[in-house]
Image (cartoon, helix red, strand yellow):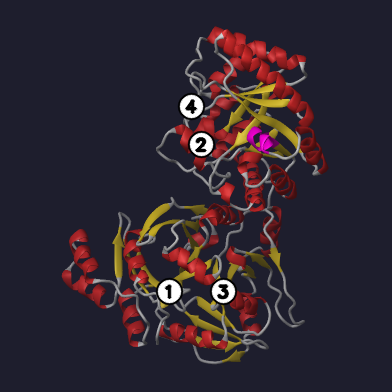
Amino acid sequence: MKTSIATISISGTLVEKLSAIASRGYDAVEIFENDLLSAAQSAKEIGAICRDLGLEVAMLQPFRDYEGLSPDLRARAEERMRRKFAVMEDLGTDLILLCSNCSPHAVGERDVLLEDLARIAGIAGEHDKRLAYEALAWGTHINDHRDAWALVRDVDHPALGLTLDSFHSLSRNIPSASIGDIRADKLFIVQWADAPILQMDLLNWSRHFRCMPGQGDFPLVEFGAQLRRIGYDGYWSLEIFNDRFRAGSASSVARDGIRGLKVLHDQSGIALRRAAELPAPVAPQGVEFIEFAASHAEAEEFGRIFHALGFAPVGRHRSKDVVRWQQGGINLVINSEPEGLAHSFDMVHGGSVCALGLTVDDQQGAIDRAAALDIDRFAQSVAPDEWQIPALRGVGGSLFYLVDGATRDAMWAEEFPHALEQAKQDGLLTSVDHIAQTMQYEEFLGWLLYYTSLFDFTKTPQLEIADPMGIVYSQAVESRAGSVAGAGKPLRFTLNGSMAANALSTRFLHNYFGAGVQHIAFACDDIFAAAAKAKDAGLPFLAVGPNYYADLEARFGLDADLVARMAEHNIMYDRDDNGEYFQFYSRAVAKRIFFEVVQRRGYDAYGAANASVRLSAQAAHRDPVDF
């Protein structure tokens, strides 16, 4: 696969964009004309910079409004094109993007379009240049790649070929099977963009909501498989218009792009029953442990919460100031070491989750997959007799430890030999249900792609949740039903972000100094017993107002006694066609992290209907928890 990206896709000056693109390993770049016009360097200097960086210039773009015009307008357009040929010569490219006409003055008679395209192809050929004709989804007359291909085919000039753009085709629901009619030698370039499915006009959808492959909802794998089936071997080039990308880190967005292209190319080959190009996606068996970085004072605060939730401190590390807490299949680790990553994490973020241990059955395969996708490894010095557990960088600089499923029992026995208390026999929490991570809005799509490209995860539809101070965007990633974890209880993460300055998620980011785990949900089989036990043990519950329960009884037709029991313990409720969901929350510890307990009865969502009530309750409690 030859990779490229349009400079419009990322932020910065043109030279900064080129540097970021080259650093992420792209083969080529599309120079967007507006970037060139605003650059301090000449076109010849930009071309030299590209060559110095090891980048080909795949194409100059765009050239608009040519075919179907009146003779005088067409003549002016041809003069503009000749000037572009000189710029292309300086840049070192022979290809320019010719968009289908959007002018209301253009005519749509096919004979006129053919004559005009043949004329401009002839002019291009005289200058040793090529034109890549593209059907814009909102083109006045040509807005379907099948019609654009029919024109290119019938003109049959060596200087005229086709551009395919996944957005323009898939936003109009054009069948990808139609790519099979296109001759690969006449397909000069393919541009890629994913997007969420939205009901809005095509131009604004394209200009503001394109995203990297894997971040949206388009069926790109089928589109890619059809391209590979016809033997296309040109550039797979990203053309992304997205306001949040242009406000974010150029290097990070460029990394996401190359990551998305690699996964897409691999998946499209697999769809054709070809050998995989990447190591298999990681299929975690579950959450082996959650590690908290905490000072001694913070460790005591977490300990009180853990005790109230039914956890017991069962072991101390062989040589470090680290304690393991346990209940059911859940392991929580509090790390109060005076040096190392946990200490540094605590200094920056305060008491918080610094690492997650995921159980995998193929550590090396997971490491290889991460390396292929440019996901950073983490390593720190360990004593000769300590376990070496490979780790990857995750959200906010936290870690994912990759725990070998075959040796995890030995790991616990050897690393935590100093017994403390016995795990409680009447513990009611059974497993980690989901982990919620909050991040800057501009980071959201990048972390979504991280999870779905590294792990064998699917994503749920994005939700907009009403916070008293604004809108929070939330989306879950979950292990697939066919994975090891999915065969039992799925592994779930929810990702949350907001543009609202005072939303709870934004206040978390400010108080926490960055992205990270904001809450952890534990599963149980008896929510009422778990809540009663936690209440007796002094858990500071998040209080839910009486109006919620009056509405709950009416909305779902619930028994009044059941609703009264839920109100007594601040238990919230939701129901769908598949089942029921019960949940209660703790208050936030040090304004940073809170805990949830859930019981699922055939229900697979996350109680989104209750989120605005929960956020309002949390907005009323901005002070730290008092025990």
**Mark 3 Cα shell of 10 Å, populated few (<14), some (14-19), many (≥20):** many
Which amino acid does the dot numbered 1 rest on?
Phe
Instruction: Tell which of 228 and 197 is nearer to you.
Output: 197
Q: Specify which label sits upstream in the sequence, 3 or 4.
A: 4
Rendered position, 137 above or below 251: above
Callout in the foreground (1, 3): 3
C-alpha span from label 1 to label 2: 39 Å
**Mark 4 Cα shell of 10 Å, populated few (<14), some (14-19), many (≥20):** some
Instruction: Tell which of 369 and 249 is nearer to you.
Output: 249
C-alpha span from label 3 to label 4: 48 Å
- The residue carrying mark 1 is 595
Q: Are marks 4 and 2 in contact (CB under 8 Å)?
A: yes
C-alpha span from label 4 to label 2: 10 Å
**Mark 2 Cα shell of 10 Å, populated few (<14), some (14-19), many (≥20):** many
Point 36% across, 82% down: residue: 534
The disc at residue 163 is none
- The residue carrying mark 4 is 138
Q: Specify which label sits upstream in the sequence, 1 or 4.
A: 4
Quadrant showing the N terminus:
top right
C-alpha span from label 1 to label 3: 18 Å
| Numbered range of the magenta stretch | 30-38
Q: Whole-percent x and y of residue 328?
A: 46, 78
Point 65% across, 83% down: residue: 415
41 relative position to 615: left or right: right
- The residue carrying mark 2 is 206
Query: Is residue 34 located in the magenta-colored stretch of the structure?
Result: yes
Residue 273 visible from this viewpoint:
no
- The residue carrying mark 3 is 349
Residue 562 visible from this viewpoint:
yes
